[in-house]
Amino acid sequence: MTSRQDQRVAENAKAVQVGGNYTDTTTNNYNGLSAAGLSDVIKTLYEMNMPQLQEAAAEKAFERVKALNDKLVERVTKLEAEIDPDRFSEPNVQYHLQQAAIETARHGEKANTDILADLLAELIRKERSDLYDMAVSQALKVTPSISTTQLDFLILLEIATNLVMPNSTLARLEYSVSNMMNNFANIKHLTESDKSYLVSLGAIERLGIIQTGFIPSIMQECLEIKDLKFDAVEQIVLNSTFRGLEQLLSLTKNRHYQNNIIGQVIGLTGLKSYTGIDVRDAFMSK
């Protein structure tokens, strides 16, 4: 069933406002566990669970795990003041360190290691809610099982339904989204099977109706188009030089899916590299 109407911020959606360098970490110490110690933990967990690989495969696998470890150490270093040292000894954290290492050893970058490293760092931050802990834990299980294009789709859904830029202009919006849209070029090739797969993983859910004429939430507070209907907004964008916004409207104007909690965490984590958004604060503000 299709609803033909001017759609703005999605029903039940919550708006999230868009809001250092790598350093040596061997001197940082979290209740006796240094960054080097964190490396040892990951290495030990990996070796315990992948003992039977042939030499060439083992070397490749360990190189992949080391790359994940380097990314995690970087994230932990940047969040040093917010790290809860007691979290390192918790079984849930140990489990996810182990599983992330195994999935990375198996699949390399296809396991979405940048997202895994960010999620692992989120799992050991202070001031988390129980819901956030559970959502991050589930996101860690799902992340290695999705493709880069499926990940981009989850990020796109966050941009379309939850992200806002108050008092923005079209030019500012174009600057913000154009790079993302260039990286999201393959989303148009995403099939219904891809989306059904994401539904089966619990990352997204189908809406009861297809919402047509939907204006992405990131555009809804734009001063030049704030009170306009979709058709008028689309015409303004088409008559402009804003190709990033044109692509965003094209990809989101017919809305049939939305992220659930797991998809929100993964989407926000992917969005972090573009906007610098704080995933924990954005999630817990909803």
Image (cartoon, rainbow, N blue to C red):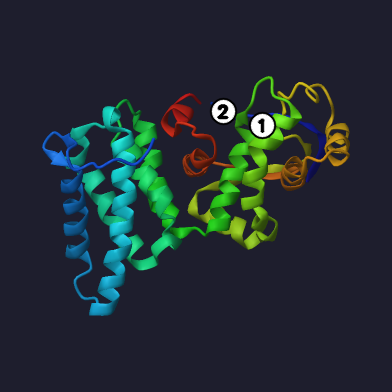
Question: Can you name the residue that lies furthest to the left here?
Answer: 32
Numbered mark located on residue 174 in the image: none
User: What residue is shown at x 65% (from left), y 55% (from top)?
Assistant: 187
Q: Position of residue 4 (x, y in %)?
A: 84, 38
Q: Is residue 118 left or right of residue 126?
A: right
Q: Is 96 drawn above or below residue 175 in the view shown?
A: below
- Dot 2 lies on which element? loop
Q: Is residue 206 visible?
A: no
Q: Say if mark 1 contacts mark 2, CB within 8 Å.
A: yes
- Which residue is drawn at the image coordinates 50% and 49% (left, top)? 202
Specify the amino acid type for callout 1.
Ile
Which is more N-terminal, label 2 or label 1? Answer: 2
Query: Can residue 198 be seen at all in this image of the molecule?
Result: yes
Q: Distance between the residues labelled 1 and 2?
A: 9 Å
Give the residue at x 62% y 37%. Answer: 159
Query: What secondary structure is found at the residue carrying circle 1?
Result: helix
Establish if 172 lies above or below 260. Answer: above
Residue 252 in the image: above or below residue 108: above
Give the residue type that dot 2 points to.
Val
Q: Position of residue 256 (x, y in %)?
A: 69, 46
Q: Residues within 10 Å of mark 2 (few under 14, many from 20)?
A: some
- Quadrant of the rendered image containing residue 79: top left
Which residue is more in the foreground, 131 or 56?
56
Q: What residue appears at the point 69 percent right and 32 percent down from the top-left corner?
A: 173
Q: Mark 1 points at which residue?
A: 218
| x and y, in percent, of residue 38 in the image | 20, 47
Q: Mark 2 points at which residue?
A: 18
Q: Residues within 10 Å of mark 1 (few under 14, many from 20)?
A: many
On screen, 45 above or below 79? below
Whether residue 265 sits left or right of residue 229 in the image: it is: left
